[in-house]
Amino acid sequence: MPLFLVLLSFIVLPTFAVEWTNDTHYDFGDLPYGKAVQYEFPFKNVGDEALVIDNVRASCGCTLTDWPQDPIAPDSTGVILVDYDAKDKAYFYKKIKVYFQGIRKAEILTIEGDIVE
């Protein structure tokens, strides 16, 4: 076996791991027209390195997000806050993409509900 393969097998890379402590989907059910609603998606850093959230993108302007700007230490928790503005009388299904530094694939959160009068 070549020496570089032997050396490579001993290198320990940091692991980045996110565990969502609730479901990644939330159904608001029936909502009154014109009333903004909010939901928190809690998560835990189960890796051995600090987690940094690079960006959180919602699928439309009616959904606002907020997230921790500071790194989340190993074995610590954080929350992605999602606000939905119920201005259209209709069913909605929205995706929120969460991008963690060092993780290529976005984590997907979803919300849904039905705006009624």
Image (tube, grey):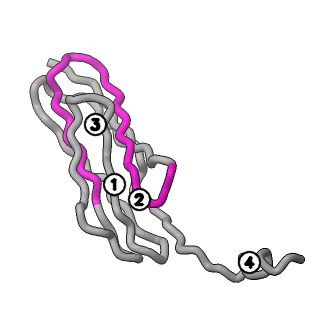
Which of labels 3 and 4 is toward the front? 4
Q: Earlier in the sequence, mark 2 or mark 1?
A: 1
- Magenta highlight range: 79-104
Mark 3, secondary structure of its residue: strand
When the figure is inspected, residue 3 is found, relative to residue 37, above or below; the finding is below
Neighbor class of circle 3 (other Cα within 10 Å; few <14, some 14-19, many 20+) is some
Q: In this figure, which residue is indicated by the disc labeled 2?
A: 101
Mark 1, secondary structure of its residue: strand
Residue 105 on image: x %, y %:
50, 48
User: From mark 2 to mark 4, how far is it between C-alphas?
Assistant: 24 Å
Residue type highlighted by circle 3? Phe
Asked if the residue at tag 1 contacts the one at tag 2, i.e. Cβ–Cβ closer than 8 Å, the answer is yes
Quadrant (top left/top right/bottom left/bottom right) for the C terminus: top left
Mark 4, secondary structure of its residue: helix
User: From mark 2 to mark 3, how far is it between C-alphas?
Assistant: 30 Å
Neighbor class of circle 1 (other Cα within 10 Å; few <14, some 14-19, many 20+) is some
Q: In this figure, which residue is indicated by the disc labeled 3?
A: 28
Residue type highlighted by circle 1? Asp
User: From mark 3 to mark 1, how far is it between C-alphas?
Assistant: 27 Å
Q: Determine the residue positioned at 24% across, 61% down.
A: 68
